Image (spheres, rainbow, N blue to C red):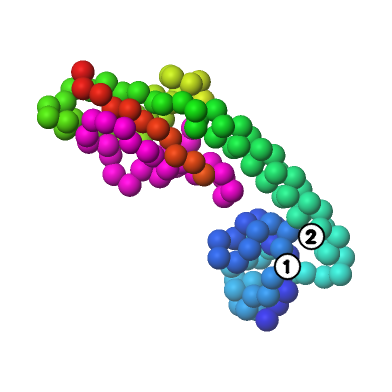
Amino acid sequence: MSKVLLRSDVGGLGKRGDIVDVADGYARNFLFPRKLAMAASSASLAQATSMRRARDLRDAKDRESAETVARALVAKVITFSSKAHDGKLFGSVSVNDLVDAVKKQTGIDLDRKALRLADNIKTTGTHEVPVRLHNDVQFQLNVEVSAA
């Protein structure tokens, strides 16, 4: 086992600045050639703490901006008007449609990956769409779909 300092976030292993134990071959054949990690030493401990501090500052800033966006969107109802018959839409409202509508109606540009819509909206009425802007910032986006 080798102790390595992660230079980048590695899924399933750790985040930038973490010191982790990995198999020698994994470090030598995967992490080191891709510049994802470096061998941990006493000198690299100071570098690790500076990496973690920078990561924490960046994370706090991202969380703060995500909370600002969430506060603005929780109070809003995003409206759609589409052709429908007996409560069923001719077509559907997709994630891309939602992102475009949020941009037009509120001026906020969301990443489509933040919306956790399991399936396209195919009926009229009020729908709640889960949104995850940050690990700590999740909320429900209210969407009102009406017949045109």
Q: Amino acid at mark 1?
A: Ile
Residue 118 in percent (x, y) is at 33, 47
Viewer-closest of 136 and 19: 136
Viewer-closest of 128 and 58: 128
94 versus 45 height, above or below = above
15 versus 28 height, above or below = above
Looking at the rendering, the stretch of residues picked out in magenta corresponds to 109-137
The quarter in which the C terminus is drawn is: top left
Is 93 left, or right, of 137 in this rendering?
left
Q: Amino acid at mark 2?
A: Ala
Residue 142 in percent (x, y) is at 40, 32
Number of disc labels: 2
27 versus 62 height, above or below = below
The quarter in which the N terminus is drawn is: bottom right
Residue 90 visible somewhere in the drawing:
no
Q: Which residue is mark 2?
A: 48
Is 80 left, or right, of 102 in this rendering?
left
Residue at far left of view: 86
Q: Which mark is residue 19?
A: 1
User: Which picture quadrant has residue 43?
Assistant: bottom right
Which sits earlier in the primary sequence, circle 2 or circle 1?
Answer: 1
Viewer-closest of 6 and 64: 64
Residue 31 in percent (x, y) is at 62, 66
Is 40 left, or right, of 8 in this rendering?
right
